[in-house]
Amino acid sequence: MSRMLRASAIMMAGTMVSRLTGFLRTAVIAAAIGTWALGDAYNAAYQIPYILFDLLIGGVLSSVIVPLIVRAQKQDADAGEAFEQRLMTLAILILAAIAVLGVVLAGPIMQLYTANNWTPRKVEIATTLAMLILPQIAFFGIGALAGAILNTRDRFAAPMWAPVLNNIVVIGVGITYIVVGGASANIEEVTDRDLLLLGLGTTAGIVAQAIILIIALHRAGFRFRPRFGLRGTGLGEAAKTASWTFVYVGITQLGFLITTKLATGAGERAPGAGNSAYAYAFQLFQLPYGIIAVSVITAMLPRMSRYVADGQFDSARGEFGSAVRLISAVIVPAGLLLMVLGPAVTTLIFSWGRMTGGNALYIGNVLQVFGLALVPFSIFQLLLRVFYSFGDTRTPTILGAVNVAINGALSLVAYFMLPPRYIVIGLAFSFMIAYVLGSGVAWTLASRKVGGLGGREVAAGLSQMYFAAIPAALVALVALWLTRQFADITALTSAIVLAAGGGLGLVLYLATAHKMRIPEVSSIIGMVAGRVRR
């Protein structure tokens, strides 16, 4: 576990700075454009490149490409150099074509993902922003592939730190939008100059991120030379394996399409309680997952793939067990604290500029529900990597279909049964239920795949972590209650609640878990204390 902890710590540091600057980025953009019509249009356009990347490339990286690169590095006489060059050549050609096609089809794409009750002006603005933002697909994908190659070489720092530059660029764009005369949050008043600033500025952030990753890859010894010969490289076999991944990503994006259309529809019926609220709450929900779970998963997958390739299933099981316990040691208290302090977090971040306190508070209510989903969502993502390490992409596809079916059905019930202002909260609750059930099914199937995952030990460890985290959540709840007795929730009172409740709660959790001798927490404390003493 110590090796995983050291590798994960490098990534956690970069990811933490990345996510914190992402916090500031989100707050600045929200302050600039709000969560009404312009905010919904921007967020809908902003999500499209990520959707297309995940649909066409992203899922293949973790499920197929990383294990293939590891295998080529172990088996090829040139340590996989030619294979990596062919991959990069193919990626550049495909991603450039996708980016061009995306810009051409921006209008139909936006109509697909937005509600039917959007006004023509709102659709026009969203389409214009999409045309300006969609070119980033090429840079995003090339940077992601560069990051994947770096990870297989145990170079984890650059992929985790590069997004910081992206966030800094977009923060500058948001501030410029606020201070430039005439820049408006009213969709009827927004000008072409405003849209150019928002759209091209957002794309510039991804371009900067890709450049950093390419430089890091060059320093790691990778030299790009175009290679077009694909015969005998194993990419044909990879394409067959990846076909299931494309199906999986297509299914999950169908679920995203349903959620987005329902959320955008809710925003028209209840302004401020639509897609922007859902998107901002989901971004904050991803903070602890991105800092902890993604870092551990990224460090785990190459090693687990090597163990599986060598037939060392005992080592693979040990790697997985260490990963799930290490993730849970931080995710468990984070989920409980989000459930309590969600409104305080979002009020501190979003109650500025063109946002209102009511809008910020609503995002916090959605975030509270997402807090319930943090543990099952993280464990589900970790379980998928068990299948990917075996080159099995079919089972994750089936699991994705089950998840989407449950989430989609419950989301439709929420949309038609709940009052408009509660629809997005209902969508978050549907998300949580889907991952609770999905992680249970995934655990059963993954356990059969690898010959057992130590379910009893993991359950016992999770019980200890929850037991240690409950006092922390109670401290946070008391801090919130006492503050509310004397004042409303404002940015200032939220900062006090987070410092008192969140800070004391976290210290209490660490102390309680250390006293209970939860090894993962003790290892984290020991590592941090060791670095402080240096």
Image: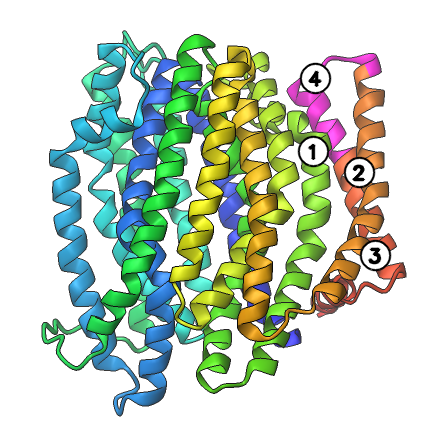
Where is residue 363 drawn, in percent x and y? 56, 24
Callout 3: 10 Å neighbours few (<14), some, many (20+)? many
Q: Are marks 3 and 2 in contact (CB under 8 Å)?
A: no
Quarter of the N terminus within the rendering: bottom right
Callout 1: 10 Å neighbours few (<14), some, many (20+)? many
The numbered mark, 3 or 2, whose residue comes first in the sequence reads 2
Q: 513 left or right of 442?
A: right
- Give 158 or 327, whichever is nearer the viewer: 327
* 159 within the magenta span: no
Distance between mark 3 and mark 2 Cα atoms:
14 Å
- Residue at which label 2 appears: 473
The numbered mark, 3 or 4, whose residue comes first in the sequence reads 4
Image depth: mark 4 or mark 1 in front: 1
Image depth: mark 4 or mark 2 in front: 2
Distance between mark 1 and mark 3 Cα atoms:
20 Å
Residue at disc 2, secondary structure: helix
Residue at disc 1, secondary structure: helix
Where is residue 387 drawn, in percent x and y? 47, 66
- Residue at which label 4 appears: 489
The numbered mark, 2 or 1, whose residue comes first in the sequence reads 1
Q: Amino acid at mark 2?
A: Ala
Q: What number is the disc on residue 339?
A: 1
Q: 304 left or right of 494?
A: left
Callout 4: 10 Å neighbours few (<14), some, many (20+)? many
- Give 414 or 259, whichever is nearer the viewer: 414
- Residue at which label 3 appears: 513
> Magenta region: which residues?
485-500
Q: Amino acid at mark 1?
A: Met
Residue at disc 3, secondary structure: helix
